[in-house]
Image: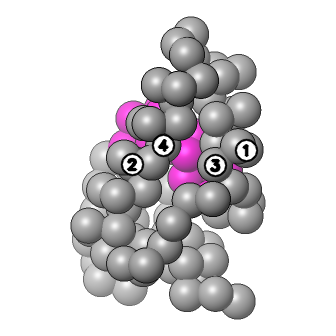
Amino acid sequence: MSLAAERLSNLALSPTGFLFDPRTGTTFTVNPTGAAILEVLRDGGGLQDVVDRLADRFATTRADLRRDAMEYVRVLRDHDLLPADFELE
């Protein structure tokens, strides 16, 4: 299992958007977009999978969804929820 997959699988995400990282004890609140992205990543999905999932839920362009997903991954890396070298492909 990759480091990214291990970190993602250890995160606890509630239906209300409460996110808990048991590795550090840190908690976060995520919005529905963030929760959807995390669900796809935890399932091993890539960028296209994220965009497809978001396009089913939100009325915006695929370019905006792609940009938002890439930015969210950067935020996850910044908070050490994903390894610094993780890239959404």
- Residues in magenta, as a range: 30-41
Rendered location of residue 24, percent (x, y): 30, 83
Q: Which residue is mark 1?
A: 49
Does 54 appear above or below 57? below
Q: Is residue 54 magenta?
A: no
On screen, residue 47 above or below 63: below
Secondary structure that dominates the magenta span: helix
Question: Given the image, on which type of amino acid does mark 1 rest?
Answer: Asp
Quarter of the N terminus within the rendering: bottom right
Of labels 2 and 3, earlier in sequence is 3
SS of the residue at dot 4? helix
Crowd rating for badge 1 (residues with CA inside 10 Å; few <14, some 14–19, many 20+): some
According to the image, label 3 marks what residue? 47
Mark 2 in CB contact with mark 4 (< 8 angstroms): yes
Picture coordinates of residue 35, whole percent (x, y): 51, 43
Quick one: SS at disc 1?
Answer: helix
Q: Residue at x 69, y 33 (%)?
A: 53
Judged left or right of residue 25, residue 47 is right
The mark that comes first in sequence, 2 or 1, is 1
Q: CA distance from mark 2 to mark 3?
A: 11 Å
Work out whether residue 72 or residue 87 is closer to the camera in this orientation and state it. Answer: 87
Q: Is residue 21 visible?
A: no
On the image, numbered disc 4 is attached to which residue? 69
Label 3 sits on what residue type?
Answer: Leu
Q: Which amino acid type is shown beneath numbered disc 4?
A: Ala
Disc 2/disc 4 C-alpha distance (Å)? 5 Å
Q: Amino acid at mark 2?
A: Tyr
Q: CA distance from mark 3 to mark 1?
A: 5 Å
Q: Can you identify the residue that label 2 sits on?
A: 72
Locate residue 59: give its quadrant. Answer: top right
Q: CA distance from mark 1 to mark 4?
A: 11 Å
Q: Residue at x 51, y 66 (%)?
A: 87
